[in-house]
Amino acid sequence: MSVDLFTSPAYLDALERHGSVGHGSGWTPVVVAPERDRCAPAYLKTHSWGEFVFDFQIAQAYAQHRLAYYPKLVCCVPYTPVPGPRLLATDDTGRTALAHALIETAQVHKASGAHVLYPHAPDAAILDALGWLRREQLRYVWHNRGYADFDAFVGALSSRRRKNIRRERRLVGEQGVDIGWQRGDELGDDAWDRVYALYARTYHQRGQAPYLASGCLRDWAVAFGPKMPFCIARRGGEIVAMAFFFVDGDRLCGRHWGASVDDELLHFELCYYQGIDYAIRHGLTVFDAGVQGEHKLLRGFDPVTVPSFHWYAHAGFACAIADFYAEERTHVAAQCRALAAHSAYRVAD
């Protein structure tokens, strides 16, 4: 059965144990397991937050026609838009059974539809073959092209991009901050309190409650140890900014950041440049810094597309949404090509 870090019990169970999913969260875990060696992380949702495949427009259309869009059944990793296995089975037969089971589960719970978000290629092939509606989303991923160190990476960029990155890093260095890496399970209680306060601040600024509880982060740190590194910036011994990551196989996944002040350059340093440097030093091939952010293109990230798959119970809406997704895919593909043509990498200086 194909399982990655994010679909492991240690990751998913901590979300439920500390209330990030479950009662009152709008995420109700649902068992989808036709047989013991097959399962899928699935949740009945009463809202569309924390998925990062945005369907608010579709929900609004349902409401305008006096139809209930919620609950909906979502197969994903909550708050974690990282591609990976979703139909957790040992072969295509098992993945096919799980795809059918998701639809059956949605029907049992009278959900408006079933959705599989950020599946990896084997799952996508099955869902495509079964006729689920395919949606494409643009994101930015850094690829290690065999760089010896960070300077070698910067040297592969156009002169304009090289100068910009060096300038940004120099300005951060002039702020008097000390930046280093530390395992989450090595942080003391005071450091944890500070790190979590910085994480929560990014949500409070938008008038939201944090998606993740402090206990959830600490449980992950204990469970994953060196696979959950923190990049921490200190000034005068005080933590002023942090970003935490996960190492999953040969990829580094950037998840969340927080700072005591709004500083765009410090954000670029901790969330992008330090992550790239970490990936190079540890021989990782991919750095996925999260969804959105066209500014990543200027800093060496490549535009890529990632699919999601959708089944809708209402036949009429399914036809209309299929047309919408087809048009959207064409637009996303064209946008991806246009962005790739403006890559930060050197063609001929």
Image: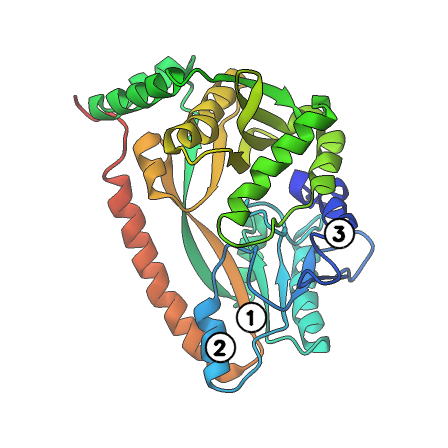
- Identify which amino acid the numbered label 3 is placed on: Glu
Q: Quadrant of residue 300?
A: top left
User: At which x and y percent is residue 208?
Assistant: 55, 54
User: At which x and y percent is residue 96?
Assistant: 65, 61
In the rendered structure, are the residues bearing label 1 and label 2 in contact, judged by CB atoms less than 8 Å apart?
yes
Q: Residue at x 51, y 57 (%)?
A: 308
The residue at the far bottom in this view is: 66
Coloring scheme used: rainbow
Q: Please give the label number shown on residue 318.
A: 2
Q: Is residue 6 above or below residue 332?
A: above
User: At which x and y percent is residue 257?
Assistant: 53, 36
Q: Is residue 286 above or below residue 109?
A: above
- Identify which amino acid the numbered label 1 is placed on: Trp
In the rendered structure, are the residues bearing label 3 and label 1 in contact, judged by CB atoms less than 8 Å apart?
no
Question: Nearest the camera: 90 or 19?
Answer: 19
Q: Earlier in the sequence, mark 1 or mark 2?
A: 1
Q: Which residue is mark 3?
A: 16
Within 10 angstroms of label 3, few (less than 14), some, or many (20 or more) residues?
Answer: some
Q: Earlier in the sequence, mark 3 or mark 1?
A: 3
Distance between mark 3 and mark 1 Cα atoms: 26 Å
- Identify which amino acid the numbered label 2 is placed on: Ala
Q: Which residue is mark 1?
A: 311
